[in-house]
DNA sequence: CGGGATCCCGCTAGATACTG
DNA sequence: CAGTATCTAGCGGGATCCCG
């Protein structure tokens, strides 16, 4: 990533890294992606297991997000050549690292349920 | 939140808490909300400061998300009775707590830029 | 300056049907 | 069972205008 052949910091590269970071952030910081990673947990899951565990997700959104996560190297997809077909998904190292911070997010949500519900009631009362 | 007048766990309440958690998660786990909270940082910001700092956000999305965050009690809005009007936004306690985990997310993004970029190239090569 | 209201285009995502 | 393709409605979000 860092240019070796020049002593000067390369502004163009910094901008590229920034826009890349934003892109990744946009990919990852969406409801379904986060819920899928959270659901994947520490062990491998089948497609259908994920569809059941991430409640409310459609077939289409699940495949679409899994592709995206695979592309970004957060998930590995393993196809078993059996009939009926069987496809397993598992988190990679970076995927598991991300999952830790997502767990923090879930934790935060549950710890503040009360505060938020109360705040909403106050706000909506007006 | 917890019912006092019964010894039995109340399934309906558990489902309510779950759907509430999902609702909050959906509110919070979206690109703009996360970027706004991250941008708010430790000190108070004006509306226009936020619009400049969260790059790419539209006027409409900024107000809309700020309302939502205020409703959920993550942000306080202070209107100063001066002309021209001046409105300040600041994180609440829960908001600051959330910001810590978001910082983790940003951190994760930057630490894995390289891995992700490489993985994408491999994936797209096919 | 901050923000509400309106209009409107484009894309997201759900439903459905088809393949290996 | 997992995945792709198509069709479509709904709404997300930008642009614009006005108001206190």
Image: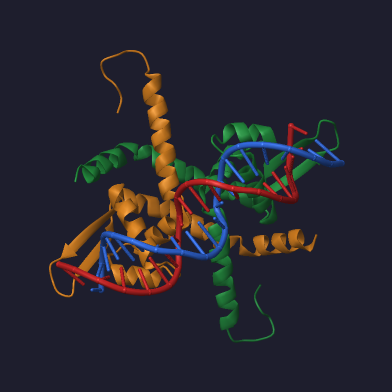
Chain colours: A orange, B green, C red, D blue
Question: Whole-percent x and y of residue B24?
Answer: 58, 60
Most foreground residue, B7 or B19: B19
At 61% from the left and 64% from the top, the residue drawn is A113
At 30% from the left and 25% from the top, the residue drawn is A2
Q: Residue furthest left?
A: A81
Looking at the figure, which quarter contains the C terminus of chain A? bottom right
At 30% from the left and 28% from the top, the residue drawn is A1
Question: Whole-percent x and y of residue B67?
Answer: 68, 50
Q: Quadrant of residue A65?
A: bottom left
Res. B44 visible in picture? no
Query: So how many labels did they put on this image?
Result: 0
User: In the displayed structure, would residue A125 be above or below residue B2?
Assistant: above
Res. B7 visible in picture? yes
At 40% from the left and 20% from the top, the residue drawn is A11
Horizontally, is A77 left or right of A83 in the view? right
Q: Quadrant of residue B49?
A: top right
Q: Quadrant of residue B28?
A: bottom right
Horizontally, is A105 left or right of B74 in the view? left
Horizontally, is A45 left or right of A33 in the view? left
Most foreground residue, B41 or C6: C6
User: In the displayed structure, would residue A7 be above or below residue A44?
Assistant: above
Most foreground residue, A109 or B28: B28
Question: Whole-percent x and y of residue A18?
Answer: 43, 32
Question: Whole-percent x and y of residue B93?
Answer: 65, 49
């Amino acid at each position: 990533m860092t240019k070796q052949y020049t002593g000067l910091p390369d502004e163009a590269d910094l901008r590229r890294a920034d826009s890349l970071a934003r892109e990744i952030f946009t990919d990852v910081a969406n409801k379904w992606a986060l819920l899928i990673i959270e659901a994947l947990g520490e062990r491998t899951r089948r497609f259908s297991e994920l569809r059941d565990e991430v409640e409310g997700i459609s077939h289409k959104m699940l495949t679409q997000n899994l592709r995206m996560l695979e592309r970004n190297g957060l998930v590995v997809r393993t196809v078993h050549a059996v009939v009926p077909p069987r496809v397993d998904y598992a988190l990679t190292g970076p995927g598991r690292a991300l999952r830790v911070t997502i767990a923090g997010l879930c934790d935060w949500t549950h710890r503040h349920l009360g505060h938020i519900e109360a705040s909403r009631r106050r706000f909506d009362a007006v």
